[in-house]
Amino acid sequence: MKVHFAGMEKHDNAVVINKVADIKYGLFTVFPFICKDFGIGSRSKIGQRVVNFNDKNFKHCIMDSGLFTLMFGAHAGKRDEKFVKAWQKAIIKFVKDTGYKGTVVEVDCQKILGVESAWKLRKELKKALPNNQQMNVFHIEDGKEGLIKLAKFSDYIALSIPEFRALGWNDIPKKVSQLCRIIKDVKPDIKIHLLGCTQKNIMERSKFCYSSDSTSWMQVLRWGSQIVFKDGKYQKVKTKTVERNGATFEKRIEKHFKKEKVTRTSKQIRYYCSMSIAGVYLKQLYTKHAGSQE
């Protein structure tokens, strides 16, 4: 199972994680590149640059729809069918305009518009982007029969681990494995993605899945410390320690930023050293629990 590092909509992040930490799988959200058309947030003007870098450098890249942000995140609000349809059209336009070649996550709107509306949009997306693989997302509203129907339709299906946690499910690793067995019974060669998952006992039990994603690597930047796997054991590493030991990463970061025509201060470079080391350590951790990340 390949863990995709989320947050690659930021070009700096992508350069550091891919080129310096040697991470080969990434995920970015389309949200900052289309949100301004809907009067939400502020537009990022580097969509083409991000797509070009991610397509060229990651072995596999996933583009998230940004719908979670619209429903539950910083820009949560009431979203009707008209809005969601327009959002999907904006996603399609972005993909066509930029020439993005990677995987596109569908607008999984079951929770706000219902299962049937999700199916209509799903079929429209597949027709509109025949050259991009789509990731279809199962939600609890679909039910078991919906899961089977989705597995028959899809080549790449996602299960939302945070949703299962919110539902209060006991023994999530076992239940995820059971859902995966249902999917594989329908279509043995289907790809399965575990959304928001780097929980070690889930990864270990679901190594046969194709992929997962997480923002765990950002923990060192958010909370000042992180748990890393180093020298055969788990250790807690403080940000200051990471930065002090990160000096060897500085020249590598500067080298790749120069290639990408990115100019940053010494303080910012030290910040990216923390990011680099987080990626290196976590790649080791994911290799231990999920298999090779090459």
Image (cartoon, helix red, strand yellow):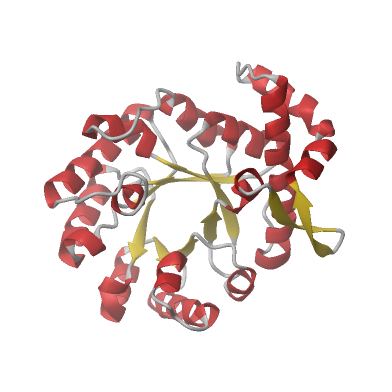
Return the residue found at the far left: 82
Q: In this view, does 17 lie above or below 78?
A: above
Q: In this view, does 136 lie above or below 32?
A: below
Where's the N terminus, which quadrant?
bottom right
- The residue lying at 68 percent from left, 59 percent from top is 286
Q: Is residue 94 above or below residue 84?
A: above
> In the picture provided, is 202 more to the left or to the right than 97?
right
Q: Which of 62 and 167 is in front in this view?
A: 167
- The residue lying at 64 percent from left, 39 percent from top is 17
> In the picture provided, is 101 more to the left or to the right than 88?
right
Q: Nearer the viewer, residue 254 or 290?
A: 254
Picture coordinates of residue 247, whole percent (x, y): 83, 32
Return the residue found at the far right: 231
Q: Nearer the viewer, residue 62 or 249?
A: 249
Is residue 95 something that shows in the picture?
yes
Residue 111: image quadrant is bottom left
How many callouts does the rendering have? Answer: 0
Is residue 190 something that shows in the picture?
no
> In the picture provided, is 235 more to the left or to the right than 25?
right
- The residue lying at 79 percent from left, 33 percent from top is 249
Picture coordinates of residue 121, whole percent (x, y): 20, 53
- The residue lying at 67 percent from left, 17 percent from top is 258
Picture coordinates of residue 22, whole percent (x, y): 70, 41
Q: Which of 33 and 101 is in front in this view?
A: 33
Residue 145: image quadrant is bottom left
Picture coordinates of residue 8, whole percent (x, y): 52, 39
